[in-house]
Image: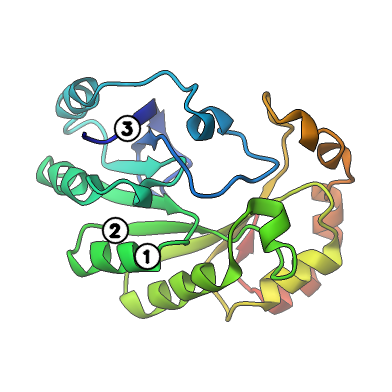
Amino acid sequence: MGLRFGGLQRTSTLDFPGVLCCVIFLAGCDLDCFYCHNRALIDGSAEAVSEDKILDFLHRRRGKLDGVVISGGEPTLQPELEGFLRTVRGLDFRTKLDTNGQRPEVIGRLIQQSLLDYVALDIKATKAEYLPVCGGAWAPAAETAALLARSGVGYECRTTLYPGLDVAGLGDILTALPKQPRWRLNFFRHPEHHRPADALRLRAPILTAKQIEAEAAALRDIQPELVW
């Protein structure tokens, strides 16, 4: 069947710390966050990109880009991911995976095969709100974080400050894991497309940069490497 590609960002200086990269988006996800910005990758409406086009692009960018980010959607759902990462490695690119951490066994296998240089793990919500916020489970995400901490692979955690999350809730999220090498906060931006049923939730209060700055010392007491 092959990988289902849903998009390509040709150049990024932000998605892979210290690495000039491209970002490849894979279609399909096992979560359904109400604030999702890539809903077309979930519902199948994203315009498909052929594997030939992706590989042609990578071949032409050898020596010009240093890394490739595999994002989504959720890349670990696709059985062909391992083979594709081997191909990317064979082209002398560094690799980064964006993941929701719901499949730690897949991430563990990719690490064992030395196919990943860096991982960004999305921590979606507080333990109590994980299911209603994203439709997933806290436990596998926490297991993935523990796996990454043991692995020697560079990684970071990321949390989007979704509508309805307050400072106390953010503190609960940050406290739920041991100190991480890097934890990035992403400020909420209203998605272009959303489910009508989520309209009310998307209008809930959101944390602003000013509020985070005001609480920065307390939040960094919990996670010293917190950035935004």
Do tag 2 and tag 1 residues touch (Cβ < 8 Å)?
A: yes
Q: Where residue 113 appears, x then y in whole percent?
A: 17, 64
Q: Is residue 228 left or right of residue 15?
A: right
Q: What residue type is labelled 2?
A: Asp
Which residue in the protein does label 1 denote? Answer: 154
Instruction: Evaluate whether residue 35 shows in this view.
Output: yes
- State the residue in front, 154 or 54: 54
Q: In this view, does 144 lie to the left or right of 209?
A: left
Q: Count neighbours of disc 2 (C-alpha within 10 A) and say few if under 14, some if 14 to 19, many if 20 or more.
A: some
Secondary-structure class at tag 3: loop
Do tag 1 and tag 3 residues touch (Cβ < 8 Å)?
A: no
The Cα–Cα distance between marks 2 and 1, rounded to whole angstroms, is 6 Å
Which residue in the protein does label 2 denote? Answer: 117
The Cα–Cα distance between marks 1 and 3, rounded to whole angstroms, is 26 Å
Above-or-below relation of 117 to 190: below
Secondary-structure class at tag 2: loop
> Which of the 4 image quadrants contains residue 10?
top left
Q: What residue type is labelled 1?
A: Gly
Instruction: Evaluate whether residue 215 shows in this view.
Output: no
Q: What residue type is labelled 3?
A: Arg
Q: Count neighbours of disc 3 (C-alpha within 10 A) and say few if under 14, some if 14 to 19, many if 20 or more.
A: many
Residue at (32% x, 75% y) in the render: 151
Which residue in the protein does label 3 denote? Answer: 4
